[in-house]
Image (cartoon, coloured by chain):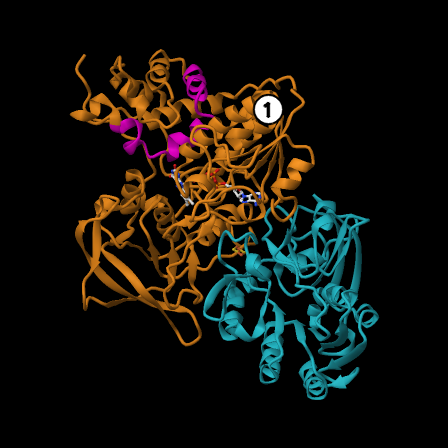
Amino acid sequence: MPIIKVKTSMPSQDPKVRKSNFNEVATGYTKEMALQEAERCIQCKNEPCRQGCPVEVDIPAFIQKIKDQDFAGAADKLKEKNNLPAVCGRVCPQESQCESFCTLGKKNDPVGIGRLERFAADYQLEAGVLDPEVTQSTGKRVAVVGGGPAGLTAAADLARFGHQVTVFEALHVAGGVLMYGIPEFRLPKEIVQREIDYIRKLGVDIQTNSVIGKLDTVDELLEKGYDAVFIGTGAGLPYFMDIPGENLNGVYSANEFLTRTNLMKAYKFPEAATPIKIGKRVAVVGAGNVAMDGARTALRLGAEESYIVYRRAAEQMPARDEEIEHAEEEGVQFKLLTSPIEIVGTEDGWVKGMTCVEYELGEPDDSGRRRPIKIEGSEFFMEVDTVVMAIGQGPNPLVPSTTPGMELKSKGTIVAEDGTGKTTKDGVFAGGDIVTGAATVILAMGAGKDAAKAINEYLQNK
Amino acid sequence: MYQIVATKILAPSIKLFEIKAPKVAAKAKAGQFIILRVDDEGERIPLTIADINRNAGTLTIIFQEVGYTTKKLGCLNEGDNIVDFVGPLGQPSEIENYGRIVCVGGGVGVAPLYPITRALKEAGNEVISIIGARSKDLLIFEEEMKAVSDTFMVATDDGSYGHKGFVTDLLKQVLDEQEVKQIWAIGPGIMMKVICATTKPYEVPTIVSMNPIMVDGTGMCGACRVSVGDETKFACVDGPEFDGHLIDWDLALRRMNIFKDEEKRAEAAGSCGGGCGCQ
Ligand SMILES: Cc1cc2nc3c(=O)[nH]c(=O)nc-3n(C[C@H](O)[C@H](O)[C@H](O)COP(=O)(O)OP(=O)(O)OC[C@H]3O[C@@H](n4cnc5c(N)ncnc54)[C@H](O)[C@@H]3O)c2cc1C
Ligand code: FES
């Protein structure tokens, strides 16, 4: 059979229509499309794709199940390694992970592994997942701090091992960035909620509105009888640029902008009570996934022009390829090799524009990327009325600063052993963005899984 | 769900709720705040803690029904529940024995000032309290404040009770006559700004409790940023109390008004979603 060179394309909402609604952009493969795409996989013996997956999903095996039309079986295969395939199928940077190793990709498009993952997971969700069996209790108690992908994954696996797990989540819902950061049009909240419901059914107790460090500290949890603690509090602290005018009305951190919109549903204001204010011309500073989400959200909230302003060049943008493509299709404009040096306000304190400078690329820096160099005399004024800062996030110090005896790195992330998540404090494990700094959903999940295994061993020997 | 176990009307449109939240009550200290959400479509609003009853596992909050959410909250009765109540948030007040101190409160700000004043009194300070309101009927927590003060004064804008004029008039008098080690001021932004301008020439450290717009209250969004001595701080984690002489007040006051238009829109769209008969 001849090889089909191109990936089966993903059906999506028309860009003109979708840029004014919050419904999911990519609508997912039909059964026929999934079968067609699965047929493209040549089932290489050496399985190169697996080395690109941070949790080593048995990719050829799950695709084979799709070929065999055993879709639920495909989802089960995924779930052996990945607790949240419906999420990862949508948000993983497949182009730099599994798909970048695909043999077909050497000459043609790689197999659409992410799209197939999503198809199988959605199929199973649609068909209805059986309630899991609750494992016989070991009598050991574990506290999980933070209900993002790292914490939820650790909690689910620990519950399967039979431990009694309580998740403490600061916000009023669990899910972490999946709920407050990544927009509805990219990851419907209902999907995240179903995953959370499933984890509850495993016997995990999720306590929202519980800010550890303010209520109990990690030490107090240990004193109160938890046999181990897993910390997965993420990288929720927004960075600003430290330039003049950043506190003007109309400047948001990406976290505030996205939290208001996603978690608090400001796009439904006033039916939902949380407001958001959006101008006509919005500049989002940065070019990662967070920035793309911000720029696309701005359009949906009614901005006439939405800009990505980024200091480096197009090929250096860290966002997933698909997010950049979608943003372009929707009309987001890219001001590359450009960065603001000041945000300028009106007399009554609202943003009226940014003074920007232009850059050119010089020699490669330590990260191997060509360093942007400021062009002297290139200052220009960019008229905008809303600015969203999406230049990165760091670890929130609330838990680290209230946990004596746990070693931290200079940027405030927690020192944890690779592969186990063990911190320098006995009985305390950590994983996800709080250890790595802002990274990805799949890495956070993988860390949660590794830590669950290590905690299980720790509890058996305790 | 968090139950409202007692309610009291303190003044026209100023209400006191006692809310059952034993874990929060066990940890809360004077000067900290909570964030609540009335219902599933509700916004997260911060309220400074007005009293803590550890034995009963309750916290007292006091609010003026000024906006969409506070009006909606005001529609609830004893026995009703709110969906979310999280805390204690922010840093507690730094309570020690300073010597002679002054606590100044205006409007609903007197409520959060009360537990701080009480703690300062218990720590051995000589407490001079000055509280104020627009008129006598809007004055709250008079008895409570009196009970924890060595000297107690009242000012009303319209002269219906106590000194006619502003709390700053009385504060100035005190500062002219006595040596004061430290001042706490809680009230509307504009009042705190004026108090700081008044105390600056006397070089008496003046602690204010900022109440900026917030979302999460855990340092995750930066909505609450305030400029303190050229540094940007997040009021929800670094505050809410700051050295009032270092605050950029014009900026702080402007930031409080970011969503003024939206607030009006929300109210126009109907406060309770109907049904409660409060309107
Ligand atoms: C807008 C946005 C878009 C992104 N897009 C992608 C993408 O497309 N693909 C991808 O792979 N990754 C993406 N990421 C990154 C990814 O979401 C994160 O790497 C991942 O969520 C990290 O998981 P985590 O569990 O470590 O932390 P989080 O998801 O941050 O969860 C941490 C949780 O801990 C809670 N918490 C914090 N402090 C406390 C405390 N003291 N007590 C109790 N609870 C606490 C927080 O409220 C939160 O719920 C994106 C991130 C953002 C912000
Ligand atoms: S309220 Fe979000 S950081 Fe303070």
Left or right relative to A104: residue B180: right
Number of other residues with Cα within 10 Å of mark 1, as a class: few under 14, some 14 to 19, many 20 or more: some
Q: Is residue B18 above or below residue B130?
A: above
Q: Confirm whether the magenta stretch covers residue A178.
A: no
Report which quarter residue A436 is drawn in: top left
Q: Which chain is orange?
A: A
* Lateral position of residue B274 relative to residue B251, left or right: right
Residue at mark 1? A459
Q: Residue at x 81, y 69 (%)?
A: B148
Measured along the vertical axis of the image, is residue A259 above or below residue A109?
A: below
Residue A86 part of the magenta segment: yes
Instruction: Magenta stretch: give its range.
Output: A72-100
In depth, the one of B193 and B97 nearer the eye is: B97
Identified at 34% across, 17% down, the residue is A63
Q: Is the magenta stretch mostly helix, strand or loop?
A: helix
Q: Is residue A52 visible to the viewer in this orientation of the structure? A: yes
Find numbered disc 1 in the image and state the secondary structure of the residue it sits on: helix
Quadrant where the C terminus of chain A lies? top right
Q: Which of the chains bears the disc numbered 1? A: A
Colour that chain B carries in the picture: cyan
Which residue type carries mark 1? Leu
User: Residue A449 at x, y = what percent?
Assistant: 48, 27
Q: Where residue A327 appears, x then y in whole percent?
A: 30, 46
